[in-house]
Amino acid sequence: MTLAISFADIEAAAARLRGFAHRTPVMTSRTADELTGAKLFFKCENLQKMGAFKFRGAFNALAQFTLQQREKGAIAYSSGNHAQAIALAARLLGMPAVIVMPQDAPPLKIAATRGYGAEVILYDRYTQDREALGRQLASERGMTLIPPYDHPHVMAGQGTAALELIEDAGSLDLLLVCVGGGGLISGCATAAKHLLPACRVIGVEPEAGNDVQQSLRKGEIVHIDVPRTIADGAQTQHAGQLTFPVIQALVDDVLTVSDAQLVRTMRFFMERMKLVVEPTGCLGAAAALEGVLPVRGLRVGVIVSGGNIDAERYARLLLEAR
């Protein structure tokens, strides 16, 4: 079976992103290393433009639009980070954008999406189908729909995060990547397995939303109800038709962490590394710091996927971690 993306696609995406995306820092922590007995390398995509890795895939997709597509613009559906990424990429490339967002998305993310110039259309994530709504609007307006993960250009763009991490950190024994719909991990696994064939790639999901873990165990895409978790960026109901075959072929395993473990990891990032990381962005790190996965003696790359969380919610969650 031919997979949706190759390493060459990631290299091409990296060239398109040069000068537009930040080359985010790879940070280390002596305390994290002592806690785990490993050498951890954190790829800080919380410091990416619009605060998350999603900018990589969005810009890579929109940069390949035809002149006719640019004139009509892009439409997307997202709980927040893909929304902001498409809105910002469209603004940089001079095209209109419409974003379908859930009514209960973090207010900060809705405000930021509108701030980048996109039109925001709200829906009820528990009663309405965002994918159907997105397709309907795209058809009515003649716009190009860019889904948050199940698109080869999006997947390839996200893979540039792992490409940069490996270029900066060197050889890794293990790569930990958060999992929602699979766009980030499919891109990162493609990069990692090409550059470091012996590197194990492990996905991490919230306990309440382990659809990809279930899918891997069953050998087919499993659909779940919208998961109730603080990791709003991983509240997906199923893996993608394009992302899942890549995950099957290249990802070694998918593990889960609890919301409580995510909150403790958020607090670790704030207190020890002075980083603001949203709950979803803590998934990979939590697997290592909370001992879900034994990492002693290993060189471990961790994709810290984003930092978009409003101040009030951030403070409330950190207080709960005491």
Image (cartoon, rainbow, N blue to C red):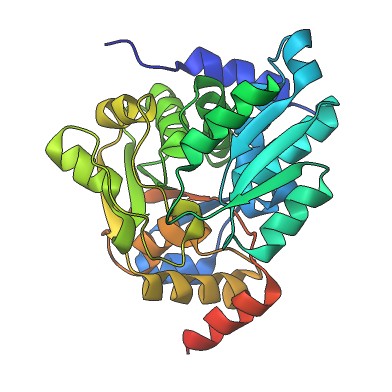
- On the image, which quarter does residue 307 sit in? bottom right
Vertically, is 12 above or below 53? above
**Does the image show residue 25?**
no
Q: 307 or 303: nearer the eye? A: 307
**Viewer-side residue, 256 vs 220:** 220
Residue drawn where x is 33% and y is 69% of the image: 258
Q: Is residue 161 visible?
A: yes
Drawn side of residue 234 relative to residue 85, left or right: left
255 in relation to 292, above or below: above
Q: Position of residue 9 (x, y in %)?
A: 54, 15
Does 22 sit left or right of 291 as displayed?
right
Q: Is 14 located above or below residue 303 in the figure?
A: above
- Residue sitting at x 54%, y 64%: 29
Quadrant position of residue 68? top right
Q: Picture coordinates of residue 137 (x, y %)? A: 62, 31
- Picture quarter with the N terminus: top left
Q: Give how far across and how far down residue 94 sits, in percent.
A: 86, 26
User: Can you give x and y, in whole percent of width and height, for residue 175 in the image?
Assistant: 40, 44
Name the residue: 69% across, 24% down: 141
Residue for point 37% across, 55% down = 226
Reply above or below: 181 against 287: above
For this orientation, the residue located farthest to the front is 140
Direction left: furthest residue: 218
Left or right relative to 109: residue 318: left
The mark total stands at 0
